[in-house]
Amino acid sequence: SQTIHQWPATLVQPVGSPLSLECTVEGTSNPNLYWYRQAAGRGLQLLFYSVGIGQISSEVPQNLSASRPQDRQFILSSKKLLLSDSGFYLCAWGLAGVEDTQYFGPGTRLTVL
Amino acid sequence: QKEVEQNSGPLSVPEGAIASLNCTYSDRGSQSFFWYRQYSGKSPELIMSIYSNGDKEDGRFTAQLNKASQYVSLLIRDSQPSDSATYLCAVSGSGGSNYKLTFGKGTLLTVNP
């Protein structure tokens, strides 16, 4: 069966510091991978998605970036965090052409102070 | 701008009652529809998917889809306190972007013992 991992689970960072969040998927090959952010009281916002290694599409212009160095690894980064980057970051995976279903990881709660 | 609309609630029902959650969407080309449950502080969990007009039942859950009216709903029969959560409606894209989901902001359901 497939499993998705995210770490860290929680993170408190000062404004202006860098960020690296990691997501890995087990038990499948060539998944579609997604990064979402859920801010307090707001809906899920798609940040990035990837349909293959090295293929990254950005949905929202911002100070975040994403990379996919391996088939089942997805990384969200920032060089300098803003207060507005605080939120619940969720990684999700899905299989191309398989009913468009997405499955979420446990998430990382980021607080920028 | 593709939109998915849900009543934010809170929707409060007594234990054992039927809870009815509704969702409308703007993209007529959408083909896949999902309901996720999100407990406070946790990541969304897929509970139902539906792709054809009509009803789809899974245990105490029934999803209903009406593409002509661009409407999807979730019924929870014999509601339990453990069903208390935020329910997110998600709709796939169209025109080749079916692997991207648009989420509503969610409806908070409270089941009172």
Image: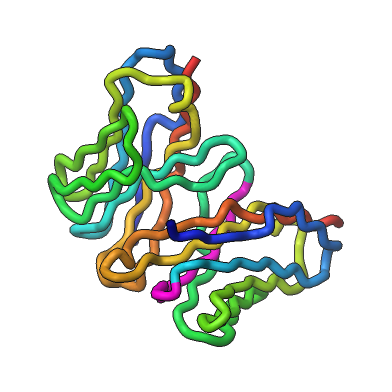
What residue appears at the point 37 percent right and 33 percent down from the top-left corner?
Answer: A7
Residue A43 percent coordinates (x, y): 54, 47
Q: Quadrant of the C terminus of chain B?
A: bottom right
B56 in relation to A112, above or below: below
What residue appears at the point 58 percent right and 51 percent down from the top-left corner?
Answer: B105
Quarter of image, res A22: top left
Look at the image and say whether residue B34 sits in the magenta stretch: yes
Q: Quadrant of the N terminus of chain B?
A: bottom left
Residue B109 percent coordinates (x, y): 72, 56
Q: Residue furthest front?
A: B1
What residue appears at the point 43 percent right and 38 percent down from the top-left corner?
Answer: A89
- Residues A44 and B81: in front is A44
Q: Which residues are magenta?
A: B28-39
A68 in relation to A93, above or below: above
- Image side of residue B40 versus residue A98, left or right: right
Quarter of image, res A81: top left
Residue B58 percent coordinates (x, y): 58, 77
Numbered label tally:
0
Residue A90 percent coordinates (x, y): 42, 43
- Image side of residue A31 versus residue B27, left or right: left
Look at the image and say whether residue A78 sits in the magenta stretch: no
- Residues A4 and A80: in front is A80
B16 in relation to A26, above or below: below
- Residues B33 and B96: in front is B96
Q: Residue furthest bottom?
A: B54
What residue appears at the point 44 percent right and 74 percent down from the top-left corner?
Answer: B28
Quarter of image, res B93: bottom left
- Image side of residue A12 versus residue B64, left or right: left
